[in-house]
Amino acid sequence: KVAELLPPETPTGVPTATATPSPLPLPTLTPTLARREFLETFEVKVAPTSFLPGRGPVLPGEFVYAGRRLDFYVGRGTFSAEQVRDLAVKIEYALGYLQRRFDVELTERVSIGFYNPALAPTSDTRGIAYTHDRTNIRIFYRPNEEPYQALVIATHELAHALQAEAYGREAQSRADLVLLEGLASWISGEYWLSLSDSPSFQARARELYQAGYRGNLASFVGSANSMAAYEMWAGFVEYLARTYGWDKFNELYANGRGRAPGSADYRGIYGKSFQELYTEWYTTLR
């Protein structure tokens, strides 16, 4: 049944690199994105007090848990119902962190379903958020896989739900892929960074840059390591927001021109091309 849903818009192409830009003065970094304190423990999480009434979209499988803002389902060939209920409490807790970090809250309930990877749209899909209508999320893991990684993927997909809340569903449907996935990874914050044990997205991007992830930032869409691509894009998003402020970034995101990576109106918003901006950012990673 998963395949019957409309898939999210896919990239329509990768823009070619333009001529090397003339040197530009580098802007001064400002503390726009001070990271919030984050304390992850193995203790039982207490769900936040905010509550959204009703029920989220009905998903395939067994309904196993109703949180304060999220509803959870589980199909066959994935985590057990007990494991999903345990994850549900942790995901509700994580949602509070995501909302505070991005300063946006859900306004209607979201459903999350856990399924076997055989039902995923592609062989490498671990999670997907459908935000074109009532938001619902699908997570794809096998029974013997690590639940914590599924938790991290769930935070990334919930970040997409928060993007749709912040910018609107229509704007979300045409967001530049670099901004779409980069911002979602950034919103996931400490959860995503915990997978690489990195202190920040800038630090993680520097590690990847030194490992050879450089050149056309848009071309990472074809990388064999999609997580590395998302982390580089998150570093770029953080650089734009920290350097030029959230207002300009929000305008850039909300006025996307399609999924093609690097296709947003960077020059119209920042007065610099996509290539000029990521080249400028690369100088901070050397």
Image (tube, rainbow, N blue to C red):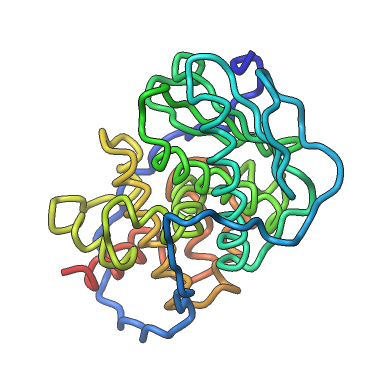
Residue 282 position within the rendered picture, expressed as x and y whole percent measured from the top left:
25, 66
Q: Quadrant of the C terminus?
A: bottom left
Residue at horizontal 56 percent and vertical 62 percent from the top: 97
Tell me: residue 121, above or below residue 134. Answer: above
Report the side of 13 relative to 21 (left or right).
right
Report the side of 216 relative to 130 (left or right).
left
Tell me: residue 109, above or below residue 78. Answer: below
Residue 179 position within the rendered picture, expressed as x and y whole percent measured from the top left:
49, 53
Q: Nearer the viewer, residue 83 or 236?
A: 83
Residue 258 position within the rendered picture, expressed as x and y whole percent measured from the top left:
56, 42
Q: Nearer the viewer, residue 54 or 84?
A: 84
Q: Quadrant of residue 50?
A: bottom right
- Number of marks in the image? 0
Residue at horizontal 60 percent and vertical 24 percent from the top: 74
Q: Nearer the viewer, residue 178 or 75?
A: 75
Tell me: residue 246, above or below residue 87. Answer: below
